[in-house]
Image: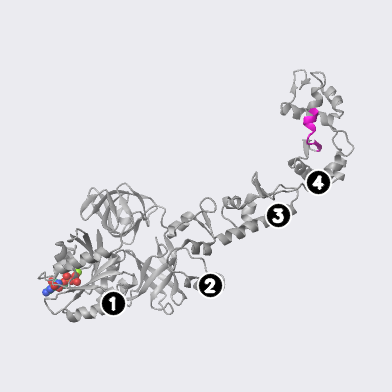
Amino acid sequence: MHVIATAGHVDHGKSTLVRALTGMEPDRWAEERRRGMTIDLGFAWTGLESGATVAFVDVPGHERFVPNMLAGVGPVPAAMIVVAADEGWKPQSAEHLAALDALGVRHGLLVVTRSDLAGPGPATTAALAEIAATSLGEVEAVAVSGVTGDGLPKLRSALDRLVERLPDADGDAAVRLWIDRAFTIKGAGTVVTGTLGAGTLRVGDELELTGSDRPVRVRGLQSLGQPASVVPGVARVAVNLRGVDKDTVGRGEALLTPGRFRPTELIDVRVHGDATVGLPSTLTLHVGSAAVPVRVRPLGPDTARLRLGRALPLRIGDRALLRDPGRHHVVGGVTVLDVAPPGLRRRGAAAARAAELDGMSGVADLAGELRRRRLAHRDELERMGVPLGEPVAGEWLADPAYWASLGSQLIGVVEDHAAKNPLETGIPVEELRHRLGLPDRELVTALVRSPLTVQGGRVAPGGRSLPAELVQAVEKAFEDSPPFVAPETYRLAELGLGARQLAAAVRLGLLVQLAPNVVLRAGAPAAAAEVLAAIPQPFTLSEARQALGTSRRVAVPLLELLDRTGVTRRLADDRRTV
Ligand SMILES: Nc1nc2c(ncn2[C@@H]2O[C@H](COP(=O)(O)OP(=O)(O)O)[C@@H](O)[C@H]2O)c(=O)[nH]1
Ligand SMILES: [Mg+2]
């Protein structure tokens, strides 16, 4: 299916033409029929010679209803511009064309209607010249009469040629259905309609609905008046939603694939059209079927920051339109450059940002995005519409230059910490994360390269020699003393071996600690086990003490340690066996 929007001045024959082409009534409201004037969007469709189906979104031409017109045109990629032969080019012909141009619509057709009332020549020449200067460029022109039916077969072939050229939609893309109508059907509940530009809707899908914090489920689908279980874009579609109150949903909201969009209230854009200097500070932004007031802050000659009155699910590269509702003036189109722009609090930040935006095209590219953000979560990039690449750790992607600099920074921090804390086995990962300003510990460990090591939640410099001073002090403490004799407390103090130093020596595998100030060399328990295995079994504490040549101060905790580690067993009479 293809979707084409009408465009043109009021009373030039748009609705009559759609009616003649489709046999359907695009003016849906009684008031529209009574006044003979389109007020809101109308929908009708027909099959073409080629077998293609084309659905029309018929728009109102009156200047008061331009916002309705924009809601219909916003999500549609092609237009049928209608000019009356007897009236020629008019103000709303111009405003509608300016809107199509601002939205970057590239495919279209000129229909000069009411050609039974006047020769179509002058209107055709004038309109083609206006259209040629826009994003539509050169278009085919057909003269018709919606009343006599003259020219309609030619128009149908021209429509076939037009839809033939329309780009195919990506059926796997994320769904963003801009809602243009919402109503209730007795027994079915809430129904919303829109033009699905890309992606695929299926009955049973769970979707996000902007402006609502609960997920919604697709209960039923209709396209061109027929029920369907699957509707791929491009399509006009009606979606019956479960669990949605009609009052909470309306035009300008959107149905979204979960997790693929992030509604944003702040965007940086390129403005195509009027210069940003001198723009009114408040304008209306039209995108998809939405219209929201925005505050405009010019940054460069053609770039600006927009603060939206309501969050919208926008992505990099989206086209939108700025309009001054007071002056009935389309200011220009905008291309979204950034949907999560940085704050501009520092002095000179706005100028720097303007320079940065100057180099941005509105085509989301990973390298550029990472260069600016340095580090980004996969989810965040995906929601902005940036194609993904290889993560550096978990779900994180990083700018290669930044990542390399983090690697060397990390080595510096680890070494600095080791120099200042010779008794610790490394810097805690969490502290390192904090010092490097990283959002996730996973990133820290991914940065650790040999010879650095991660152990027990700490990062240690590699090939680290034991702190010389500590080793020396420990050597001195045991100098000339028999293997199972612990140095006296005063001697440990003399050598500067306090509680912290002893704990470090234990961690480094130099000592074994039996009691607060009772330490032996690390190998002592194993050596004691050998000595005790060689004496008659079982043995008393006193016999063990004598065999080891030590005091009760050492023997008691040493035997308890051997008991605990299963080397010795303590019998009921307090004697032990190895
Ligand atoms: N003679 C003649 N009248 C037409 C033609 N097309 C539309 N009209 C008349 O022009 C008026 C406006 O038509 P309408 O389709 O409502 O215009 P719209 O505002 O562009 O939708 C109506 O009175 C139509 O009957 C045509 O081809 N020939
Ligand atoms: Mg009409």
Label 1: element kind: helix
Q: Is residue 27 left or right of residue 551?
A: left
Q: Within 8 Å of ligand 1, the CB of disc 1?
A: no
Relative to the observer, which residue lies in front, 273 or 35? Answer: 273
- State which image quarter holds ligand 1: bottom left
Q: Is residue 492 left or right of residue 66?
A: right
Q: Quadrant of residue 155?
A: bottom left
The residue beneath circle 1 is 132
The segment highlighted magenta reads: 517-528
At x 81% / y 38%, what residue is drawn? 517
Image height of 88 relative to 567, above or below: below
**Quadrant showing the N terminus:** bottom left
- Give SS at disc 2: helix
Q: Between label 2 and label 3, give the one nearer the viewer.
A: 3
- Establish whether ligand 1 lies closer than 8 Å to the Cβ of label 2: no
Specify whether 210 is left or right of 525. Answer: left
For residue 415, the mark is 3
**Given the current orientation, which residue lies at the most extreme left position?**
148
Dots 2, 3 in contact, CB < 8 A: no
Q: Any magenta on residue 522?
A: yes
